[in-house]
Image: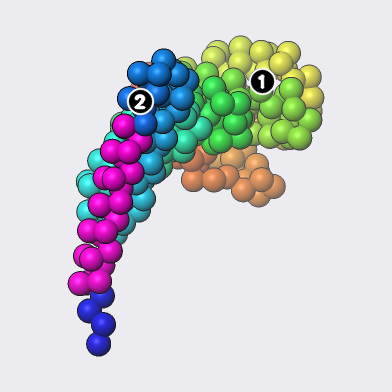
Amino acid sequence: MVDYLVKAEEFEKKAEKKLNDAAMLLEHAANSYKLAKSWDLAGKANSENKHDAAYAYAQAAKSFKKVNANEAASCLEHAVNIYCEIGMLGMAAGIYKELAEFYESDQNMEKSIAYYEKAAEFYQTEEVTTSANYCKLKITQYSAQSEQYEKAIKIYEEIAQQCLKNTLLKYGVKGYLLNAGLCHLRKAGVISITNALEKYKDLDPTFSRTRECKFLVDIAGSIDEEDVAKFTDVVKGFDSMTPLDSWKTTLLLRVKEKLKAMELDEDDLT
């Protein structure tokens, strides 16, 4: 029987020796280039050395994920720091996104949002818009869940404006504006959403003809009338045509609870 553990340890020792030799040779090459005043080649040699190290850390993280999550995160941190140092922002963005997903699965929303923000920033710098928007939407999702509605509104509106400039992405604008509108409703109520709707109609003249716009108008109307039954009917009517996801449902439930409290206050006054 082959002892795979022993063979693995042998391969690991050989690999470590080769990596150390390669690192040492690249370092010698960089120093020699410096002495020759070939600064660009010296920089390239150093960069190659660090790139290999970053790649090794990223690969190590994949293995650690199976047995030690903290070690995996630590390896990713090392990798992303190196990629940032050598200016490989696209690779760094991917690692930041991976770290965000790691903390997301660990239910550490604060760290997850921080890394999604870093990933979005770097993707934006590299003009990888789709990936940047994916990270931004994750930020809005968790920001709204933690009642940071202003932050979520700002991002949804920014993405909507970006999508209006792209023929292929225009269809998604009404969804982003709907989500921003729901955040307005939960944050500050009818006055806030009324002002927002005027802004959105100016931003996208087609929005006023959408089911999403009518939904926000009808919801605002039910809140203005402090009518919980009407609110429920409006939500059911929209959901029957365009099923609501869990994020929207959560926000609407929060709005409904607020509306119920307003209705109770009104009853107490009478």
Give residue 47's position: percent from left, percent from top: 41, 30
Give residue 143's position: percent from left, percent from top: 41, 29
Camera-nearest residue between 264 and 39: 39
Q: Which SS class for mark 2?
A: helix
- In which quarter of the view is residue 7 placed? bottom left
Q: Which residue in the structure is indicated by mark 1?
A: 161
Camera-nearest residue between 200 and 139: 139
> Residue at point 41% right, 31% down?
45
Lateral position of residue 251 relative to residue 30, left or right: right
Q: Residues within 10 Å of mark 1 (few under 14, many from 20)?
A: some
Residue 18 in view, yes or no: yes
**Secondary structure that dominates the magenta span:** helix
> Residue at point 29% right, 56% down?
15
Q: Relative to 270, is 58 above or below?
A: below
Q: Which residue in the structure is indicated by mark 2?
A: 32
Which badge, 2 or 1, is on the more N-terminal residue? 2
Q: Relative to 47, is 23 above or below?
A: below
> Residue at point 33% right, 43% down?
22
Q: Relative to 251, is 20 above or below?
A: below
Camera-nearest residue between 35 and 251: 35
What's the residue type where badge 2 is placed? Ser
Residue 118 in view, yes or no: no
Q: Which SS class for mark 1?
A: helix
Residue 97 is inside the magenta segment = no
Q: Give the magenta-colored segment's residue range.
A: 5-28
